[in-house]
Image (cartoon, rainbow, N blue to C red):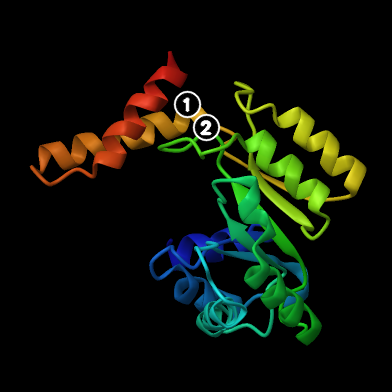
Amino acid sequence: MDEGVIRAAYESGMNYFDTAEEYPGHHRVLAKVIKSMDRKKVFIATKLEATKAETKEGFLKRARKSLDDLQTDYVDCMMMHCPEKAETLKDAGFHAAMAELKAEGRVRHVGVSLHGTFWFRDPEETMEKILLAAAEDGRFDVFLMAYNFLRRDNSERVLEACREKRIGVALMKTAPIAIYYNLKSRVEALEKDKKAIDPLYVDGLKRYKEKLD
């Protein structure tokens, strides 16, 4: 994440900015630009992974740190980041923490994000199954989901459920072919510099090559 790119995006009219707890340093970079934004005109989302046996207090501590790092009084959406199974959506600690933060006005909406098959590995259950379960759950206001012309994840069914349940949607992985070329360039650069390559990148490149073909 680059401060200049974010600032240029904002000045050109973009108003949706997505980040996450696990993106190294991103909160602090975005915080530098938030100070110069008209906060009422932008939608800022961040994400927390739902880990096993996490308590309400644990989620609150992590969420508050995200808010502190972003240097903002509230986020427009805090999402459960890429749950692997529909069962994870029920995490009591996560929902208790989100309810408290909503009551405080520090979180306006609760969401869930999912890459589907357009990532380095598949979730344990399909994106369709997980997000349809999230729609039925009733506690999620926004989905950040993969959607593109390859239609590998039955996204249309999810979008229809969102329409029925009045759930907001933001799309990602809309250009899957571009992801292949970006990842290929990254792996080739590491090979040229004789640097270690994360096996996840190698596996991911194979997966995206199948999509490219």
Across and down, in percent, residue 76 comes to 72, 69
For residue 35, side relative to residue 100 (left or right): left
Across and down, in percent, residue 77 comes to 70, 66
Q: Which residue is mark 1?
A: 177
Which residue sits at x=82%, y=47%? 136
Across and down, in percent, residue 31 comes to 53, 77
Which residue sits at x=57%, y=51%? 83
Residue 92: image quadrant is bottom right
Measured along the vertical axis of the image, is residue 28 above or below residue 162? below
Residue in front for this viewpoint, 144 or 40:
144
Residues at marks 2 and 1, CA–CA distance in whole angstroms: 13 Å
Quarter of the picture containing the N terminus is bottom left
Measured along the vertical axis of the image, is residue 146 above or below residue 150? below
Helix or strand or loop: what does disc 1 sit on? helix
Measured along the vertical axis of the image, is residue 134 above or below residue 15? above
Which residue sits at x=36%, y=34%? 204
Q: Which numbered disc, 2 or 1, marks the residue that appears first in the sequence?
A: 2
For residue 195, side relative to residue 159 (left or right): left
Q: Amino acid at mark 2?
A: Thr
Foreground disc of the pair 2, 1: 2
Helix or strand or loop: what does disc 2 sit on? loop
Residue in front for this viewpoint, 75 or 5:
75
Q: Amino acid at mark 1?
A: Ile
Label annotation for residue 117: 2
Task: Say whether residue 148 is visible.
Answer: yes
Label annotation for residue 149: none
Outermost top residue: 213
Residue 181: image quadrant is top left
Which residue sits at x=46%, y=72%? 29
Measured along the vertical axis of the image, is residue 101 above or below residue 12? below
